[in-house]
Amino acid sequence: QVHLAESGGGSVQAGGSLRLSCVVSRTTYASLCMGWFRQAPGKEREGVALLYKDGSTTYADSVKGRFTISKDNAKNILYLQMNSLKPEDTAMYYCAADFARYPAAAGDFAYWGQGTQVTVSS
């Protein structure tokens, strides 16, 4: 069993920054692929950034150059650094994890946090 708990959301003006955190528990016996997703009202859940077991990363085109996914392995915390935020980034943000090598979509991730709200005003 894997438990995820997000924090760090809030309200900021366009151009501002936020850093989301996700505390990851019970990862002792196998490596996890991690990801950040977001969902705006009336929209489908969208992949934002993925961190694979080998340390490689992928980003949605809409956030490339602005967002960075990383993990502090010693503390077991996943981060999403979000810079140059835009109103279009407004959404509920979720962290997710799976033991598969290359999960690619939201449906591929077995473990989810409860979400943290990010609101960006113009």
Image: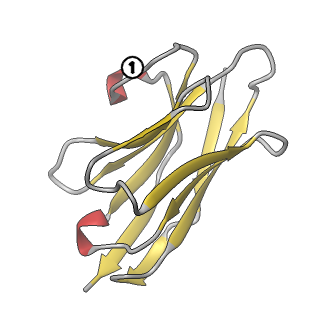
- Report x, y in % for residue 66: 41, 63
Q: In this orientation, which residue lies closer to the viewer: 1 or 22?
A: 22
- Report x, y in % for residue 58: 42, 38
Looking at the image, residue 94 sits to the left or right of residue 80; the answer is left
Q: Residue at the spot x=61%, y=23% of the render?
A: 53
9 lies above or below 15:
above
Looking at the image, residue 104 sits to the left or right of residue 61; the answer is right
Is the image coloured rainbow, by chain, by secondary structure, or in one colour?
secondary structure
Q: Residue at the spot x=39%, y=59% of the render?
A: 65
Q: Residue at the spot x=45%, y=58% of the render?
A: 67
Which quadrant would the C terminus be assigned to in this image?
bottom left
Question: Dividing the picture into quarters, in which one does residue 86 lie?
Answer: bottom left
Q: In this orientation, which residue lies closer to the viewer: 56 or 24?
A: 56
Q: Which residue is mark 1?
A: 108
108 lies above or below 113:
above
- Report x, y in % for residue 116: 48, 58
Q: Residue at the spot x=58%, y=16% of the render?
A: 99
Question: Dividing the picture into quarters, in which one does residue 16 lie?
Answer: bottom left
- Report x, y in % for residue 56: 54, 32
27 lies above or below 24:
above
Q: Please, what is the three-letter code of the amino acid marked with disc 1? A: Asp
> The residue tagged with tag 1: helix, strand or loop?
helix
The local crowd at label 1, few if under 14, some if 14 to 19, many if 20 or more residues have their Cα within 10 Å, is some
Which quadrant would the N terminus be assigned to in this image?
top right
